[in-house]
Image (tube, rainbow, N blue to C red):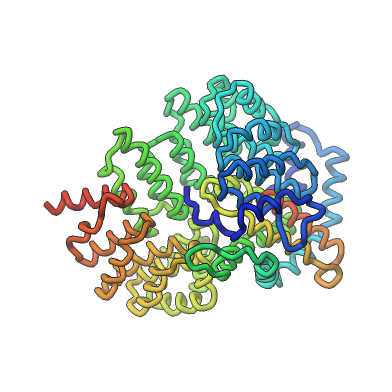
Amino acid sequence: MDKRFFNFFNLSEDEAIALLDTPQSQISENDSRYIAASHLVNFPTDRSIQALMRAVQQTDPSLDNRIVRRKSVETLGRLQAMQAIPVIRGCLQDEDCYTVENAVWAIGEIGTQDPAILEEVAQLLDKPGQTYRVIIHTLTKLDYAPAIERIRRFMAATDLPTASAAITAICRFTGDYSQMDKVVAMLQNSNVLARRLSIQDLIDAQYYAAIPEIACCPVSLVFRLRGIRMLAESGISSGAITFAAIQPALEQSLRDHPKDLKLVHHYNSPPTLPVLIRELYETDFGRCYLATQTILEQYPDEAPAALFATYEEEARSDYGAHFHVVKLFGWLKHAPAYDLLLEALHNRQPQFQKSRAAAAIALAELGDPRAIPELTTCLTTPIWDLKYAALMALEKLGVTRVYEQVTEADDWLVRLKSQASLQLQF
Amino acid sequence: MKSVVTTVIAAADAAGRFPSTSDLESVQGSIQRAAARLEAAEKLASNLDNVAREAYDACIKKYPYLNNAGEANSTETFKAKCARDIKHYLRLIQYCLVVGGTGPLDEWGIAGQREVYRALGLPTAPYVEALSFARNRGCAPRDMSAQALTEYNALLDYAINSLS
C-alpha cells in the first residue's frame, strides 16, 4: 500500500480524537471531524480505534455526520481492528449504500470466518441499490463458498465492472478460467474506470496470461505497473511465472510510449495543436496518450514551443499534464528541455512522483551525458519505479557497471532486473 | 447518459408500458427546473477556474493543519493536487446541470472511483473539504438566482456524499 498521502494533516493523535469526539453541532467552522477520521489511520492504537468506534455509533443522519461515520468505518478497516467487527457489522443494514459498502470493504480488510457475518454480507447481493462489486470482492476474499450461486447471477450484469468482479470470483472459487477473456476485453473499454477496475480483477484472479494485455491498456501507468507488479509478486513467488516472462511488459510500461498502447479513443476530425495540448490535462489518460501520439505524428516541430508555454501557464502545477509534457519532451528528443526534465527528475512533491521516473526515461531519450550523474543520484531512492527507470535510462546512456550499486536492500523487482542484466553481461 | 428523461423511458420500456402519470410528472418537474439548472451551468462554466481556486485556497486557509507533510512540506503541493481534481468534479457537476440528472457524476466520477481511491490509498478529505466550501460559499442573488443555487448545491452535496 502506497502511504504517501496518509499523513496529510499534521494533526496529533490527541487532537484528532478530540475533534472526532466533538458533537457535529459543536464543531468549529475551522475544524473537520471527517479529516480527523481520515487521519487516525496513522495511529493503530486502542485509543484511536475506540474513538473511531464511537464515531461509527453516532447515527445523526446529516450529511456531515454520515460522511464521518463512513470514513471511520473505512479507517477501522485499514487499521484491521478486529475488535470493531461488531460495530461495523451494525452498518451492514444501514440505509446509506456507501456506509454499507465501506462496512463490507472493512470486513474484508479485517477478515473474519464467522459464517453469520459472511451470510449477512452475502444477503446484500439480493438487496437493491448496493455496490455489488465490493460485496463480491469481500465474499471471495473471505472464501465464502455458500455465496457462489448468488455471485454467479452477476456474471451477466449490465454494469461491466460488476460482471467482471463476478466472473473473477467464480474463477477464483472454481478454477474455471473460461470467462476470463471477458475481463481481459474490459481493458479496452471506452470507460476509464472499467479499464482500471478490470486490472484489479485480473490481479485478484492471478491471471498471469493477461500481463502483456495489461501493459497495453490505455490507463495511467500507475495502474498498469501496480497490476504487473502484484501479478509478478504472486506469480514469481509461486513459481507460476518467471521474471524473464514479465520483464518486457514491465519495462514497456515503465517506458510508456503511446505506440505500445492499444488506444481506445479516436478523433472524428484532425485536431489542432491547441486542442491536443488541452487533451493532456484530461483525467482519462487514454485520451492523453492519444493526444501525445497525435502530437508526435502531426506536430513534431511546433510542439516544443506549445509545450513550454503550457508548462509555464498551467502544467507545472497540474500533475497529469506535467507528466505528459515531460514524456513528450523525451519522445521529441528536445534538447532545450533538459533543465525542465532535470527539475522534474528531482521534484520530491508526492503528487509529481510519476513524473520523476518519466523524466529519467526522457533524459535518456535526449542522450545528453550531463544527465548521467543526475540519474546516478536516483539510485539511492527507495521509490522502486524511479530506481528501475533510472537503471534503464543509465543503460540507454551507455553506462556500464551500473548494477553494482544494486544491493540486497533494494526492491525485489530492482534486484531481479539487476540479476537479469548481469547474467546478460557475462 | 442517465437523466430523469432517460430513467423514465428506460423503466417504461423495461416493463413494456407507456410512461405513467407520475413518470410524466417527474419529467415535467425536471423540465420546469431546466432554466435554473442551465443558469447555474452557465455561471459555473464562465467562472470554473475561480470557483475551483477559491475552494482550495479557502480550504488551505481554513485548515491550518492541511499542510502537506510530504518531503516538500509545502502547501503548494496540496493546492496543486486538489485544484486539478476539484476542477474535474466541478466539470462533472456542470454536465449534470446540463443533463438534468446525476448521470455524468455517477458514470465518470463515482462508479468505481471510490474503489480506486481506497485501493491506491488516495485521500478524499481534501476534495470533501474543498467542495463543502464551494457549497457554503455560494450566495443568491450575488452569484446566481436562488433556484439556480439550489440546483447547484444539490449536486455539490451529491458529489460530497459520494466521494466520502
> Residue A258 versus residue A27: which sits nearer the camera?
A27
- Residue A341: give x, y in percent of width and height: 38, 72
Q: Is residue A333 above or below residue A160?
A: below
Q: Is residue B105 above or below residue A100?
A: below
> Residue A100 versus residue B8: which sits nearer the camera?
A100
Q: Is residue B13 above or below residue A364?
A: above
- Residue B35: give x, y in percent of width and height: 83, 62
Q: Is residue A23 above or below residue A340?
A: above
Horizontal arrangement in the rendering, residue A37 relative to residue A268 (left or right): right
Horizontal arrangement in the rendering, residue A73 relative to residue B35 (left or right): left
Where residue B97 sits, quadrant-wise, is: bottom right
- Residue A143: give x, y in percent of width and height: 51, 25
Report how many numbered discs are placed on residues in the image.
0
At x 28% / y 59%, what residue is drawn?
A: A392
> Residue B137 versus residue A24: which sits nearer the camera?
A24
Residue B35 visible in this rendered orientation of the protein: no
- Residue A159: give x, y in percent of width and height: 60, 38
> Residue A90 versus residue A372: which sits nearer the camera?
A90
Horizontal arrangement in the rendering, residue B128 relative to residue B30 (left or right): left
Residue A416 visible in this rendered orientation of the protein: yes
At x 56% / y 42%, what residue is drawn?
A: A79
At x 33% / y 58%, what residue is drawn?
A: A387
